Structure formats: structure tokens, C-alpha cells
Image: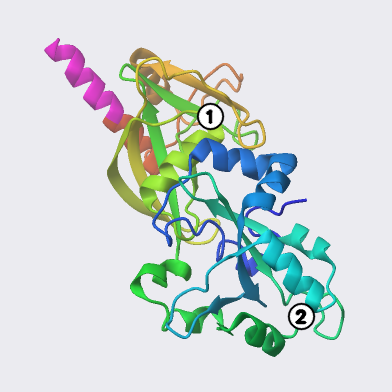
Amino acid sequence: MCSKNGMVFSMHTCGLIVHLTGIFGRECSPRYLFELKEDDDVCRKAQKSGMFYLFHSLAPLLQKSGILAPPLRISELERILGKFGQDTKKIEHSVLIGCSDQLEAWFALDLGLGNPSSSGSLQKSEMETELQGSFIELRKSLFQLNEKDASLVATMSPVVIILVSDGTRCLLARQSSFPKGLYSALSGFCDVGETLEETVRREVAEEVGLELESLHYSASQHWPFPNSCLMIACHATVGPGQTEIHINSQELEAASWFSLEEVITALQRKIPPASQQGSTVWVPPKLAIAHHLICEWVQKQSSSSSLS
């Protein structure tokens, strides 16, 4: 099985080496990347033609010049593993980290996972000699990487929150964990190496299957849960005829387009509503940045209506 989102590593490392697309200056189609992450068969097939970046106990392989070592094709990786008596099934534990704009998948493989004395792990010194590079501890590598690769190390937990509009309606969604009737804007964590714009487009594509036409920044807010996040709020639009929603049931319980009148009604309801019926739609309270986004959209739509 192809590992996703770095879950093959221990919990504190999740997000450190996932989605390095921004590091290499190329952007993959959000839909294709989502397909790679969700479909193991597609992911396995992509390994055959993909590229592998090597790590050892979470330390990336660097060249002496201070840049990430070139990735390997699967044939070269199999040769190296065979040379050191390793089962090539080890490749199945690689982590999907992104893809190029030519739809070439990128993976990360940690050669040092497991007990160093067991056959499941490769000795760091032997690998450095074979690969003609050095595995540098992740934090220290920041001081050796050139400007292009310096974004490898994360220092915060940025989260994007996006209110999508088709020009006359806005898209609101809910998770199964939400209180009954609560709908909000889409949101998600930024992956390491991604720009905010890339994260916004990826999250929208992953959660509701929409390709964005444009987006712009609105505001930010510190949010202490779950792990001291910086909420970065954006408005986004989809093009005409590009409004069909495809809900990712693993992420969302429901998502719908709402008219200006429906959103105004939801904003006017007391929070939480006295009626707890699921059909009663309401939105986050004023202290949440999602409320700010929704009010901005209502104000813009109301102004446009008065001018027309």
C-alpha cells in the first residue's frame, strides 16, 4: 500500500516531509494528486514511473553543495536495496509527497526506519557512501539548504479557510462532527512546501471536486485548537458551468450552494438555534473567522444587487 500524508512516520513528524511540491517550484494537478492519495492501485502504478527522494531516520539526503540529492527511479532504488540485501517490498512503505506538472509522482522513502540491527533498516554510513551524499538531521539541514530548498522545515501550523462562490451563491459544508445544522467554509492544513494558493486549490479540489478560477486573501486569525493554528481566510470563485459538487465523504457529511437570501437567514438565526432540526441551517458565531468571510460575501453581494 502507498502511504499518504506521512503517516508511515511517527505522529510528530506528520507534515514535515509531505508535499514538497513548493520546494521544486512545480505544481501538480490537484485532482490527480487527490487520486494518487486515495487510490492505492493508481499510486502503485505511479511508483513504477515516479521518482524517490531518500531519507534516513527522517534526515534528508543532501549533496555537498547544500541541495537535496537528485531523486532515484524505482529501477535504481531496487538495485541499491538488492545490493544491501534488502527486500524491494520496502518501497511499498514510501510516502507520496507530490507530483510534477507533467504528472510524474514523487515519493519519499526512509531507509532508516526500524531497528538499525535488523534487516529492516540500512546503515546510514553505508548509504551515504553508496549515494555520495549525507543524511543531515532535518532541523540542521535548514542551515545547509539553498534558498530553493529552504522551505523543507516547517515552523508553524497554517490553516486555510476558503469561502467559494460561483458569482451568485456561496458554498458551505459540514462535517459529521459539527452540531446539527451548522455549515461553514471549507478549510484544511497547509502541507510543507505548498504556497497558500496551492493549499486553497488542493483543499477545494479534494473536498468538493471543484477547480478554482480565482482567489484572494481576506484576513487571518489565531486559533488555539487543535495545535495553535494560524487561520488564513480567502475568498475563491469557480468559473461558469464549473459548479457541480463531488463530495469527499471521508472529509465532509454535506456541501451545498446557498443563495444570498439563504445565507442572510442563516446569519440572523440565534446560535445555536432553538430548533435542533438538521434542516435548520446556521453558521459559525461572530468570533470565528468563517463568520467574517460569510459576512464579507453577503456585503459584496448586497452591494452588487443594489447597483444592478
Q: Is residue 10 visible?
A: no
Q: What is the secondary structure assignment of the residue under circle 1? A: helix
Front label number (1 vs 2): 2
Residue ranking furthest to the top: 308
**In the image, residue 213 above or below residue 83:** above
Which residue carries the number 1 mark?
208
Q: Position of residue 182 (x, y in %)?
A: 53, 29
Residue drawn where x is 42% and y is 19% of the image: 242
Q: Amino acid at mark 1?
A: Val
Which residue carries the number 2 mark?
122
Quadrant holding the C terminus = top left
Q: Which residues are magenta?
A: 297-308
Residue drawn where x is 75% and y is 61% of the image: 91
**In the image, residue 136 above or below residue 197:** below
The overriding secondary structure of the stretch rendered in magenta is: helix
In terms of depth relative to the viewer, which is nearer, 86 or 160?
86
Q: Quadrant of residue 41?
A: top right
In terms of depth relative to the viewer, which is nearer, 299 or 29?
29
Q: Earlier in the sequence, mark 1 or mark 2?
A: 2
Q: Position of residue 276 (x, y in %)?
A: 60, 23
Q: Position of residue 18 (x, y in %)?
A: 56, 59
Q: Is residue 17 magenta?
A: no
Residue drawn where x is 66% and y is 58% of the image: 95
Mark 1 Cα shell of 10 Å, populated few (<14), some (14-19), many (≥20): many
Q: Position of residue 52 (x, y in %)?
A: 62, 62
